[in-house]
Image: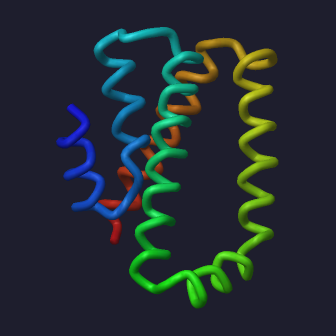
Amino acid sequence: MRPGIGFLSGMVGIGGGIFLAPILLLTRWADSRRIAATASVFILVNSIAGLAGQLMKSGWSSGGEAILAYWPVFLGVLLGGQIGSILASKALPEIWIRRLTALLILYVAVRILWV
């Protein structure tokens, strides 16, 4: 499953987590909270690998400066991730997690087809 997700992600130019979550939901692998957590870890590992690849391609000196230039984005991702995990684990009912996941998938699908 993972090579197929990676191939599809590379073809459309987005992360594989957007494909992994619906596949896990359709196969009833776990509840929505556990699937959201699994997809988040998958996205984190893919992001770190992509960042490492970019650093290796451009060299640390130029790549490191580019990373430092985007520190507000990293801060936003960290804060957004914390807020999302708190909402998903404590505040939102499971049906809303499913609906928000479906909305995100619909948004990505429209963006892929639109461009």
* Residue at the image point whose x is 73% and y is 61% from the top: 74
104 displayed left or right of 16:
right
* Residue at the image point whose x is 36% and y is 34% from the top: 20
Q: Please state the horizontal and vertical placement of residue 104, each as a whole percent of the image.
A: 51, 42
Q: How is the image coloured?
A: rainbow
Please tell me whether residue 95 is drawn above or below residue 56 in the rendered image: above
Please tell me whether residue 20 is drawn above or below residue 25 in the rendered image: below
36 displayed left or right of 92:
left
| Quarter of the image where the N terminus is located | top left
Q: Please state the horizontal and vertical placement of residue 11, each as a whole percent of the image.
A: 22, 61
Q: Please state the horizontal and vertical placement of residue 54, each as a whole percent of the image.
A: 45, 74
Q: Please state the horizontal and vertical placement of residue 93, each as a whole percent of the image.
A: 69, 13
91 displayed left or right of 98:
right
Question: Which is nearer the eye, 73 or 51?
Answer: 51
| Quarter of the image where the C terminus is located | bottom left
Quarter-of-image position of residue 21? top left
Q: Count of labels shown? A: 0
* Residue at the image point whose x is 65% and y is 76% from the top: 67
Please tell me whether residue 13 is drawn above or below residue 88 in the rendered image: below
Please tell me whether residue 38 is drawn above or below residue 67 in the rendered image: above
Question: Which is nearer the eye, 115 or 82?
Answer: 82
Question: Which is nearer the eye, 107 or 90?
Answer: 90
7 displayed left or right of 73:
left
